[in-house]
Image: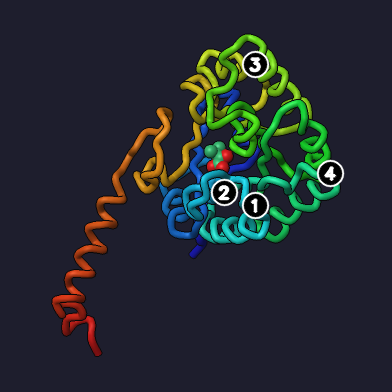
Amino acid sequence: MSQHKVKRRTILDLQQMKTQGEKISVLTAYDYPLARLMDQAGIDVILVGDSVGSVVAGYDTTLPVTMEEMLYHTRAVVRAAQQALIVADMPFLSYQIDLVEARRNAGQLIKEGGAHAVKLEGGVHVAETIRSIVNMDIPVVGHIGLTPQSVHRMGGYRIQGRAKAQAEQLLADARAVADAGAFAMVLEGIPADLAKEITETVAIPTIGIGAGVDCDGQVLVIHDILGLCEKYSPKFVKRYADISGTISDGISTYINEVKDGVFPADEHSF
Ligand code: KIV
């Protein structure tokens, strides 16, 4: 009997989706169980984001995340996902020092992590780095606007591109990222009309987060949409489930049953 093999999404599929006006669905994942569930649900792209630092490790920013941590989480997601395209984030300091380090680290995420593409933050200033990685045949996703690794330069997680000069800079960033050979770009925390203009300007798909409905696709952090991250909830997050309540109830019941000697029952014993 022949086994049905699932066809994995490719960067060509994403380009075609933009051309045909089909929206691209993207979620972050950092572990096997959640990556498996979203893959089975039919997500187009899984991003192993450096947001792992905030939502899993409990840091205030993404800056402390290391290559080792990204490799660990990327491997877990890769083992789980059969049909989604998997993009791994390049963490802070893995691509900013020089092109050699950037190329080596991007290569590691593909070779040792098993990702299909990498993502890095920045516009005009990282265009040369994007080009250099693309020249190794590694697909790259750009990320412009509110770039979390620039939190200190931005003075916090603030919407970018409201002023005319900033909007013009973001348009230049978008063109630079596309011209450098990125196959897609994340637009984060920018006004919806600017995201629309960028989406109509560049030929590659735009993936929005806090960037309005006119982007070619949308990405959100899985912990945010499941209600697993109570630290803060930005305006652009929509909560699709409240998993925290379910988990807390389960844990409380377990504690009570252990205390009361109700668990383990006969059926859990040998
Ligand atoms: O790290 C991340 O999860 C991201 C998305 C929010 C786009 O970069």
Report if the beta carbon of the residue with label 4 is closer than 8 angstroms to ligand 1.
no
3 or 1: mark nearer the eye: 3
4 or 2: mark nearer the eye: 4
Question: CB atoms at circles 1 and 2 under 8 Å apart?
Answer: yes
Circle 4 crowding by C-alpha within 10 Å: few under 14, some 14–19, many from 20: few
The residue where tag 2 is placed is 48
- How far apart are labels 4 and 2 at the CA level? 23 Å
| Quarter of the rendering occupied by the C terminus | bottom left
Q: Amino acid at mark 1?
A: Ala
Q: Amino acid at mark 3?
A: Gln
Report whether residue 45 is seen.
no
Q: Earlier in the sequence, mark 4 or mark 2?
A: 2
Question: CB atoms at circles 2 and 3 under 8 Å apart?
Answer: no
Q: Position of residue 262 (x, y in %)?
A: 14, 77
Residue under the point 53% across and 31% down: 157
Residue under the point 50% across and 61% down: 3
The residue where tag 1 is placed is 115
Residue under the point 63% across and 9% down: 164
Q: Quadrant of the rendered structure where residue 128 is?
A: top right
Q: Amino acid at mark 2?
A: Val
78 above or below 223? below
Question: CB atoms at circles 4 and 2 under 8 Å apart?
Answer: no
Q: Earlier in the sequence, mark 4 or mark 3?
A: 4
Horizontal side of residue 131 vs 149, given as left or right: right
Ligand 1, by image quadrant, is top right
Horizontal side of residue 252 vs 34, given as left or right: left
Report whether residue 168 is seen.
yes
- How far apart are labels 2 and 3 at the CA level? 28 Å
The residue where tag 3 is placed is 166
Q: Earlier in the sequence, mark 1 or mark 2?
A: 2
1 or 4: mark nearer the eye: 4
- How far apart are labels 1 and 2 at the CA level? 9 Å
